[in-house]
């Protein structure tokens, strides 16, 4: 029980003390920082200025993830097929995995 308590408290103290240098770096002597308020376009932070560009970046990221998953499925299907050892059920399972991964990529 004592070990669990230490493992729970230790990260909390670590996270608390990590924030102190950040607060120390705050420059509170700058009067312009307290009086000027500016609103920036949150899309410009990511290098995007229009909603169309944002949607394009999201689609690009999703396609990258889908491509990675398809690659993993091709590797897994190939491994299942190669390690079948003559077992027709495993060969069929590996072939089906490869076929459905290819069909998924064609649909996307």
Image: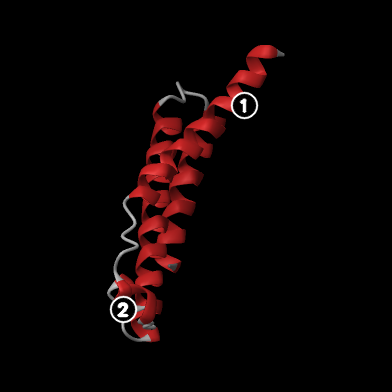
* Residue 60: % across, % down: 35, 68
Of the residues tagged 2 and 1, which is closer to the observer?
1
Please report the residue visible at 53 percent of the width from the left and 31 percent of the height from the top: 13
Spatial distance from mark 2 to mark 1, Cα to Cα? 41 Å
Q: Is residue 18 above or below residue 38?
A: above
Quadrant containing the C terminus is: bottom left
Q: Nearer the viewer, residue 77 or 4?
A: 4
- The foreground one among 66 and 46 is 46
Q: Position of residue 21 (x, y in %)?
A: 36, 43
Tell me where residue 45 appears, x and y as whole percent.
32, 72
Query: Mark number for residue 89?
Result: none
Q: Quadrant of residue 53?
A: bottom left
Q: Is residue 33 visible?
A: yes
Tag of residue 8: 1
Q: Secondary structure at mark 2?
A: loop
In the picture of the structure, the residue carrying the numbered disc 2 is 48
Q: Residue furthest right?
A: 1
Which quadrant does the N terminus fall into?
A: top right
Q: Nearer the viewer, residue 108 or 96?
A: 108
Q: Residues within 10 Å of mark 2 (few under 14, many from 20)?
A: some
Q: Residue at the location (35% across, 72% down)?
A: 57
Residue 3: image quadrant is top right
Q: In the rendered view, tell whether residue 72 sits above or below residue 51.
A: above
């Amino acid at each position: 029980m004592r070990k669990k308590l230490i493992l729970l408290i230790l990260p909390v103290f670590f996270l608390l003390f990590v924030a102190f240098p950040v607060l120390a770096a705050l420059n509170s002597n700058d009067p312009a920082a307290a009086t000027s308020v500016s609103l920036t376009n949150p899309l410009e932070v990511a290098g995007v200025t229009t909603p169309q560009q944002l949607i394009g970046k999201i689609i690009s990221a999703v396609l990258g993830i889908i491509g990675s998953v398809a690659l993993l499925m091709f590797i897994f299907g190939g491994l299942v097929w190669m390690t079948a050892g003559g077992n027709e059920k495993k060969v069929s399972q590996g072939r089906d995995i490869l076929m459905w991964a290819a069909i998924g990529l064609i649909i996307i």
